[in-house]
Image: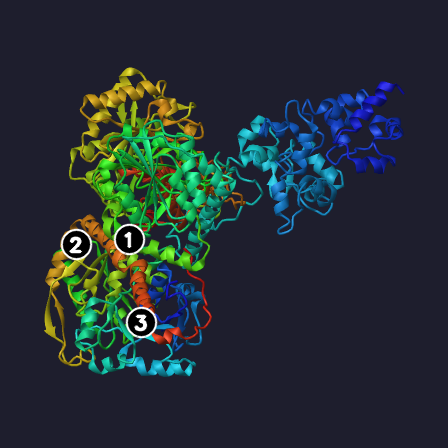
Amino acid sequence: MNPLDNVPVTLIGHPFAPIGMGEQLRSHIAACAAAYVPCSVLDIFRYAQRGDAAHAALIGDREIRVPPGGIRIFHVNGDEVDRVREAFAARGGDFDAGYNIIVPAWELPLYPKQWAARLAKFDEVWALSAFLQESLATAGVMSHLVGQSVEPPPGPLLPRRYFGIRESAFVLLHFFDLTSYAARKNPLAVLDLFRRLREAAPFRDLHLVLKVKDGERDAADWAAEIGSDPQVQVIATPLDSLRVRSLIAASDCFVSLHRAEGFGRGLGEAMALGRLALGTAWSGNLDFMTEDNALLVRQTQVRVPPDAYPHWQGQTWAEPDIGHASALLGPVLADPARGRDRALRGQTEVLRSHGHRAVGLRILDRLEAIAAAGAKRLARPAPRRRRAPAPA
Amino acid sequence: MPHDDLQRAHRLLCSPFVEEDAFRAAFHGGRGDISTILRYLRLRPLARPSLSVYFDREFYLATNPHLFEQQQDPLLHFIETGIDALRAPHPLVDLRFIVNEDPGCLGDPPDIAALLDLLENDRMRPSPYFDPAWYAGEFGEAPPSRGMLRHFLTAGLAAGRLPNRWLDPGFYVEAYKDVPRDRYGALRHFIVVGDSEGRAAGPYFDGRLYRRRYVDVADAGIPPLWHYLTNGRREGRQVPAERMVALPAAAQPGQALPVAGAMPVAVETAEYDFAAMQRLLDDAQQARKDAVKPRPPAVALPADAHTALAGIEFPAADAPLISVLVPAYNEFAHTVACLQSIAAAPPARAFEVVLADDASYDPDMERFAAVPNLRRLRQPRNLGFVRNCNAAFAQCRGEYVLLLNNDAQVLPGAIDRLAAALDENADVAAVGPKLLYPGGRLQEAGCYIRPCGESTMVGLFADPEEGGFCRDRDVTYCSGAALMLRRADVGATLFDETFQPAYCEDADLCLRLIAAGRRVRYVHASQVVHHLSVSTNRQSQTRKLRSIARNQQKLALRWGDLLTRLDAVRPIAFYLPQFHPTPENDLWWGSGFTEWTNVVKARPSYIGHYQPHLPADLGFYDLRTADALTRQARLARRYGIEGFAVYYYNFGSRRVLGATLDTVRADPSIPFNWCLCWANENWTKNWDGGEREVLVEQSYDAETIDSIIADAVAQAADPRYLRVGGRPIFLVYRPLQLPDPHGFAAACRAGFARAGFPGVHLVYVESMEAVDRKLQPGDFGFDACVEFPPHGRAVPAETPADIIKPGWGGYRYDYPQTVRAFCRRDSVPYTRYPAVFPSWDNTPRQPDHGTSFDGATPEAFRVYVEEKIEEVRQFLVGDARLLFVNAWNEWAEGAHLEPDTGFGHRWLEALRDGIEAKRWA
């Protein structure tokens, strides 16, 4: 018998939230299924709207209301640990009556010390990228590198026409960040890159699509302002996961001139859909982007300016070389076939390392090791299992 | 009364056609009682009761008037001689129709019992006018269990039910004053009189309109509803209800119609169309599996394993040529059966059997020590499948090693045929047999591996006799359950122990061989039954699935690039060059004629009919210009299309429409890859390649053939010309039109050989007459054929159309159902390249008699593409993994991937998305 056989596994966090923490949790649900690890899902705060059909289909009857024992995998951030533990207890959960894992997000090279202390309340920490693993280590937190899956679900994709994107054009897509810490995503660099590309060839059939989150600071005003440019399109309406995936597939190249990324999910998803990815050669995205399967932009390390990001003190991040980005795109724009070969290599490579099965097996390895080590708390009578194993 | 008459009547009335209950009710006694027969005979012949629900005396008399004059009994006449002459006993039981549909179904001579069986069990339509399947379907969840016609005649008709979708006796009574007032009388009137007169059968079928719309039917004098129900429906002809729809003023005939704008894109419809197409194809797959009638192979597990064991003996072999390696861990009875199957039909050449016992705990396994000349290796401890096999492999002495699971049984000749396949192909390193389930279904005809590392057994659960599985072919791997290897190619170590205890080790081995430049081959004539034990324990099942997942991941990491390369598909689109003026067309159609001339004139024939298709990105191009060709080629490449199959025309050694390829060949910088498709048919006024109104006739004289071959050879020298296995691809559109296909093929091969090519890859198109003729490419000296949808499998649209074009009498088909029909085809024992079509509509060429496909959406097309890629994966290997598209630019046939105003790039996007979705799983 496998020691894991009777241990319930629960993913806890924000399974319905259309944000990064939700994405990473959902990707772990699919990963568990691919490795035949039955798991339950607990929505800890229950504040997120449940409007996305794909989320509902994925979570399905895995959702439970009462926190069980066994192994609990918390997809929450260091700064919300205390609130999560309170909510967990309020729901009737006994935090100490199980094995607790936390999968935190973070984007800079030094993990905040004050959060590290909170992580210590967990039995184990999983890292989403090697970059994050190193960052955690700087705060004395040891972690297992598990990563997250970027594999798209099967099914239809919406065409360019759905978004009103010029079909003939070579389309660059960027997820534009308007939040107060936008400097990390470095959106203005993308506009700069686009300006340079246009100056080099004013009548080239090139198109820039910027997705901004609705309701974010001045999004509408900003969209209206930039929207007058016929070669730039701003999409400010909220998009569910099918639409986001379709939007990525509708582009030719996903661009991220970030200064730092914990993982770089957008780049990974684009690669998994067979699209060319152009990104800064630094931080979490290097777990799956290489010189051969994507376009990596040279960068230099600079100090994070005061208040450009929480816990900025003492941190560095990347300053991508926009000229280099432009040079990388030149040959691709001249002959898109070159970019496609690279993108297709990227597609299979990222799915090999960050597909459901690859991530699921890394999760399974950890869970089996935990169960084999026979942590005492796992020996307690487990609640009835809620799900049969995932179908073959 | 003469005794003979009485005897005859008695004999005939005892026929099963006469219903006992009806007889008893009429004569208050059974047919066995001679007095009741007398009572029957005392009635005047024309006043006797019918005695069968399937017999209508009045109808029979009306259709056989001589009986009336001779005062003969119609019922007895039918039973005695009428059935032999295929006289119809009832307006809804039409024996001539039945025999025409299925010549053997009534027996020869026709037999009453067979007729009754057919009627009572709804085996087919008893008349075009009665449709049992439709009738049953109208009941929803609880139809009568059987005997639809009986139900209709005894209950349904009175209750207002219809015999088919179009014929409504109630409507008929109301519509015509000269018709009998009862429903049955009206029904009969319609069948006997009304249909021939072109009367309306119901609110949705008006014979007069049908005749007006389809003049050929009127000319032939065929009753309209009869024609529709026997042929017209299959041909996609339209049910002619009076449903002309008023158009907005701007769209009145003779006025310009506004050009259709972009077709709307809605998430809900996109998801629905995708899912609906998937469901249709899933149903088709299931239906195919359900239709299999497996015959269990002639092997069984021995009733008593111990007794069977005592009879097993192998010959001594000092220098065996074949080693049969049987790994075993317990499973005594299976192991006995396995060895017995070898001993019962031993291979012809010297062989040894090596039983590798992985430290079984079943004491019975010790008994194998007694089998004469069995090499029994027993591991000191349980090593697991992979290590056990490796240890035993090192002990094998044969040049060829057959791995054979101990739950497999070889059928006679299986081992010899595998060995012969290795003998014949020096670069083949491994061969696998046809694996069967004990119940007779196919288990595996070779396997393919998706780039993600998951493998699929080709033909799982299918009929092992289906064509595609009855042909040897190269494969990615064959299951290690029965796999014969050339020991020298494998080297010292069989399986990589990374994969222990088991799963995917066989795939890894085969990939190792392929990576080393060797081939793996499926050998269909070698058959092995594999019991494939299935664990029922959930936890062990989970453990197994996890092991498989781990090993698939290892496979993907190790061989991922090779797998991606092996899995690549080469999309090629048919390409029409008729987009530049030619002297011929100028003369026939007017100066400046091209396809565009017709394309722009097309107008919708019915509501929802998408016409005209007008070009978007590429505009109204002229295919003599390098710029247009370059843009086409770039667009194709952007969406993953490798090249074009360009139609080539040559009449009497004179090329027509050749300017396009002249431009391409003159400019090596145009990224235009192509092969030729000789469109060998007459040009006619009707665009149908037929014999009427011929503009220019296809000639087949030696000089013409020579010039065609010379052109093909010259073009094939271009590095952009498409090849398979180094051989240039050359297609022929209508192979059956060739007076001497063999001679043509031989001349072609000679021509290419003379020019220094390693050969030519001759492919014919399954167009028109070539579909369903049970022809094989080899029969004509060809190498392969290619599907040409929608030709040959089109399924008519059943929904009525709201016709808006006056005088329109065209043909409508259902796109999703047609796709389903193409995906349901049986596989074939030769190379048939699959093809897909995005949409089809020749209204530009036939404004009033166009053929169109409704329900074609990019989402359905994408599902179609994915399904056909699965077909490629199953049956094609290497650079022969071609997927054709009909077509790139058949604008006048509405079959074009090229962007139009309505759909833009959506067909191209769907094709690309389908291909890319298959790049991993």
- Output the chain of dot 2: A
- The amino acid marked with disc number 1 is Glu
Identity, as a three-letter code, of the amino acid under mark 3 = Met
Report in which chain the residue with disc 1 lies: A
Residue at horizontal 41%, vertical 57%? B540
- For marks 2 and 3, give the CA distance: 29 Å
Q: Earlier in the sequence, mark 2 or mark 3?
A: 3
B140 left or right, relative to A326: right
Question: What residue is at 21 percent from the left and 58 percent from the top?
Answer: A277
All told, the count of numbered labels is: 3
Element type at mark 2: loop
Tell me whether the residue at label 3 lies in contact with that at label 1, contact meaning CB atoms closer than 8 angstroms.
Answer: no
Q: Position of residue B364 (x, y in %)?
A: 43, 46
Q: Is residue B74 above or below residue A41?
A: above
* Residue A292 circle label: 2
| Residue B64, placed above or below residue B157 | above
Q: Is residue B566 visible?
A: no
The residue that mark 1 highlights is: A167
User: Is A208 located above or below residue B873 in the figure?
Assistant: below
Identify residue for label 3.
A21
Which quadrant holds the N terminus of chain B?
top right
